[in-house]
Image: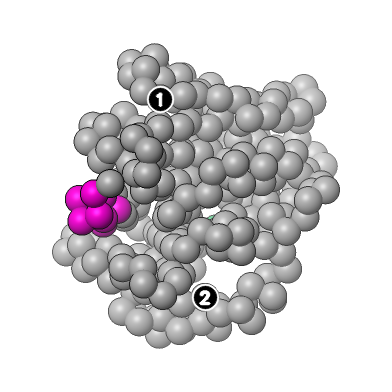
C-alpha cells in the first residue's frame, strides 16, 4: 500500500491521555498493544477507573474507524472533565482503537482492514482486535457507548440494543441532542428501522456486514446494553463532539441512578 499522509499527530492524543492519568491516580492506564506499522509504532491505550465492588460498569470507546474524529475528541474531553470521578461507576475507556487510521484519517487500520468487522475472529488478522478482544472479555461492561460518525447521515442518531429489563437510554439521548442540533429524519438506515433518531440493528444487518463489530462482540458475550452514537460528518466538528458528550453524560446519569436505586 502506498504510504498515506499523516493528518493527525497521534502523539498529541497520547500526551492528553497520559496527562489525565498523571493528574488523577484513580485512573489505571495500560498499553494493551504496541501496534507495528513499520516504520511507525503506536501504543494502543486503555484506561480503567475501578469503583466500589458492585458498581455498574460503563465502557466508553471511540476511534475504531480512523476517519471519525469527533468521537475520539469527545472521549478525550470526557476524560479531562470531572464527569468520570463524579459518576462513581466502574469505567473502562478506549480513547482511540485505531491509532494508525486516526493518524492518517482512514476508516481502516494500517493493513487496510475494517476493525469493526474483526471481533468474531479469535485468530484475528488485525493487531488491534487481537488485543481488544481479551481486554474487553476480562471485565464485561453493563453498558457500552461506542462512538462513531456517519458520512451520509442528515442528522444525529444512535443505535441501541438492550436486553429486556434494561432502561431505554437512546430516546433521552436523542431528545437532548435535538435541543441543540438536527436529528436524522430517516426512518430506515442500512435496512434497519429508525424511531425518531433511535436505530434498531437487526440480526440480518449483522450477518450482512461481514464480521462482528465491537458492540456485537460484547452483546454476544453477555453485555446487556449497547449504544452507538453516530454523528453526521457534514456538520461542524464542535457540534458532533457535543452530541457524543451528551450521549456519554446521559449514559452516566442512567447508570448512576441505578447505583442509587439498588444500594448494596
Ligand atoms: Zn464508524
Q: Is residue 255 magenta?
A: yes
Q: Residue at x 83, y 48 (%)?
A: 123
Q: Residue at x 39, y 66 (%)?
A: 158
Q: Is residue 60 above or below residue 174?
A: above
Nearer to me, 161 or 5: 161
The answer to whether 240 appears left or right of 222 in the picture is: left
Where, by quadrant of the figure, is residue 86 drawn? top left
Q: Magenta residues, as a range?
A: 253-263
Q: Main secondary structure of the magenta part?
A: helix
CB within 8 Å, label 1 to label 2 = no
* Residue under pointer 2: 201
The answer to whether 7 appears left or right of 169 in the picture is: right
Residue 178 location (% of width, % of height): 22, 66
Characterize the local packing of mark 1: few (<14), some (14-19) or many (20 or more) Cα atoms within 10 angstroms. Answer: many
The answer to whether 176 appears left or right of 9 in the picture is: left
Q: Residue at x 66, y 46 (%)?
A: 133
Amino acid at each position: 500500500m502506498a504510504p498515506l499522509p499523516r493528518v493527525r499527530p497521534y502523539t498529541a492524543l497520547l500526551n492528553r491521555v497520559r496527562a489525565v492519568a498523571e493528574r488523577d491516580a484513580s485512573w489505571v492506564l495500560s498499553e494493551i498493544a504496541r501496534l507495528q506499522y513499520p516504520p511507525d509504532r503506536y501504543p494502543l491505550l486503555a484506561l480503567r477507573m475501578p469503583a466500589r465492588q458492585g458498581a455498574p460498569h460503563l465502557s466508553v470507546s471511540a476511534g475504531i474507524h480512523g476517519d471519525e474524529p469527533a468521537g475520539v475528541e469527545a472521549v478525550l474531553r470526557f476524560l479531562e472533565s470531572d464527569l468520570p470521578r463524579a459518576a462513581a461507576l466502574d469505567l473502562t475507556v478506549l480513547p482511540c482503537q485505531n491509532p494508525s487510521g486516526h493518524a492518517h484519517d482512514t476508516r481502516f487500520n494500517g493493513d487496510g482492514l475494517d476493525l469493526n468487522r474483526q471481533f468474531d475472529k479469535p485468530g484475528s488478522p488485525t493487531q488491534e482486535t487481537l488485543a481488544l478482544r481479551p481486554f474487553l472479555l476480562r471485565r464485561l461492561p453493563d453498558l457500552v457507548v461506542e462512538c462513531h460518525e456517519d458520512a451520509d447521515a442528515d442528522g444525529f442518531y444512535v443505535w441501541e440494543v438492550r436486553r429486556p429489563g434494561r432502561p431505554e437510554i437512546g430516546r433521552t439521548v436523542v431528545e437532548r441532542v435535538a435541543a441543540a442540533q438536527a436529528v436524522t429524519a430517516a426512518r430506515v438506515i442500512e435496512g434497519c428501522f429508525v424511531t425518531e433518531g433511535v436505530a434498531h440493528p437487526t440480526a440480518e444487518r449483522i450477518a450482512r456486514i461481514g464480521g462482528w463489530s465491537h458492540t456485537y462482540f460484547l452483546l454476544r458475550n453477555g453485555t446487556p446494553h449497547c449504544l452507538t452514537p453516530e454523528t453526521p460528518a457534514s456538520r461542524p466538528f464542535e457540534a458532533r463532539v457535543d452530541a457524543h458528550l451528551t450521549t456519554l453524560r446521559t449514559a452516566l446519569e442512567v447508570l448512576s441512578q441505578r447505583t442509587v436505586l439498588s444500594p448494596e
